[in-house]
Image (cartoon, grey):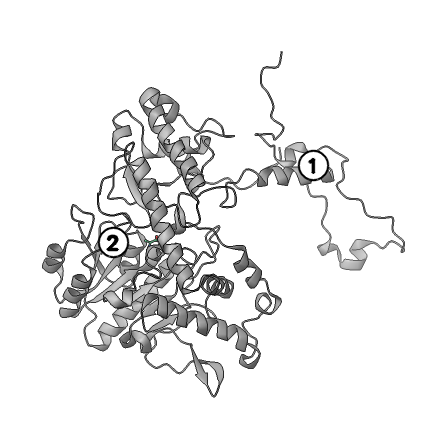
Amino acid sequence: MIKKVRPHINQNEPLLFERSSPGKVAYQLPPLDVPPVDPAAALGADWVRSEISGFPEVSEVEVIRHFTRLSTWNYAIDLGVYPLGSCTMKYNPRLNEYVARLEGLAQAHPYQPEHLSQGAMRIQATLEQMLAEITGMDAVTLQPAAGAHGELTGIFLVRALLESRGDAREKVLIPDSAHGTNPATAHMAGYQVVSIPSNAEGMVDLGQLDHLVDDSVAALMVTNPNTLGIFEREIRQIARLLHSRGALLYMDGANMNALVGIARPGDFGVDVMHLNLHKTFSTPHGGGGPGGGPVAVTRELEPLLPAPRIVSRNGALSYDYDRPQSIGRVRAFYGNFGVLVRALAYILAHGGNGLRNATLDALLNANYVRRHLEGCYELPYNAPTMHECVFSDSRQAALGVRTGDIAKRLIDYGFHPYTVSFPLIVHGAMMIEPTETEDKRELDLLIDALRSIAEEVQRDPELVRSAPHATRTTRVDEVSAARKPVVRWKPA
Ligand SMILES: *Cc1c(COP(=O)(O)O)cnc(C)c1O
């Protein structure tokens, strides 16, 4: 009797080492048609490897199948909706990849002389202009390699400006809903972090702010829309209050997917902000990079931007290193060029109206998800939803099921989990950001899965608590995996 059906795609693919069988060879070279030489004599004995012990001996098709099977184990944006949204990686249109692979761009070398780099430099100059237009800011640097790096650059700019006024000040205010990189940045730039509690609507409390901003405050770092997916409606008053007391407004632009083409930070009083090209502008964001974290500033901060700056002289572009007020370089060369190319391709392929429509679709999709799930999951803040909605697990927690359990169960339904337990101010947070690219059919599948899981929690909480059931491994020890990873194969 067959006890267990072995699916054709083996869910427990062994290591190649475990498949090894002595004498198997994946590829055979044709017989020598030249006289053989002694490798040690030809290369020097030091360069000749002795036997590699435990090296797997497998056939060609075993190697091909092994890696092809492993490749099917990944969830990918090309397979289905990614409820983590732009903050992790939204869909990167194929056109961006095509443009980035054009030979003249892909093979450009950073040490190429300026007169041979005019095209690459024009891409950078054009992207700076377009990002300035999109944000409503006066100048942009493309140097920072990611959002957190942009934040650090931005707060260095704040410090440099305040120092030039004779008073760097001591504190940076940060709402309690902020991303962890904000307080880390302020701390690294030598500021003391003061947390501002959000009000009942999930926004910065103007009264609290009024109370906290004195002449020791350098800046407020605010994410808008914030990490609850809520637009800070009083942002103009916030900016006015800060400016009236000599402080600056830093905006974390990680959520610009909700604003592009609709509202411009420069128009609501922001002094300095970063963008995440690998979020809003769709460039790939795998394995920790590479990314792009351009910083946009007002005219007042422009002379302080990292050197060099691209300038146009007599019809040609060149790098200007003579920037006496600059905070200096923050990165080698001029940013992650391939990312810049993709971001510009994305912007130009959409055009102004296209970018605006993408934003509107992102908002529509998040609101559609919210509407269809608010009957099953608790919505801790009832303010209008922008590009993402944040539920809490409080109804399910009453039955002993937490956000992490629901996320694991979602894997059984064939979806990547949503963002678990962030933002921290929502206990048991379940954050869903569908982005603009998902159509109604795909969203309905996700909604059906999450509604079905909510019913399972009522009927059989243990089923959800012990998920996933359809994967190769169930619960792994995530803490040990992160702290003590085993990455080396030791042959027996
Ligand atoms: C992603 C994110 C950051 C950090 O950006 P990286 O590009 O990952 O360094 C900062 N703030 C918010 C709100 C984010 O979502």
Question: Can the viewer see residue 324?
Answer: yes
Residue appearing at x 54%, y 72% in the figure? 110
Q: Read off the residue under disc 1.
A: 62
| Element marked by disc 2 | loop
Residue appearing at x 17%, y 69% in the figure? 243
Q: Nearer the viewer, mark 1 or mark 2?
A: 2
Residue 288's place in the image compared with 124, above or below, is above
**Depth check: 132 or 325 in front?**
132
In the image, is 246 to the left or to the right of 66? left
Residue 383's place in the image compared with 449, above or below, is below
Q: Read off the residue under disc 2.
A: 231
Taking the image in four quarters, ligand 1 sits in the one at bottom left
Question: Can the viewer see residue 270?
Answer: no
The quarter holding residue 413 reads: top left
**Depth check: 46 or 236 in front?**
236
Residue 407 image offset from top left, x and y in percent: 38, 35
Residue 300 image offset from top left, x and y in percent: 27, 76
- Which labelled disc corresponds to residue 447? none
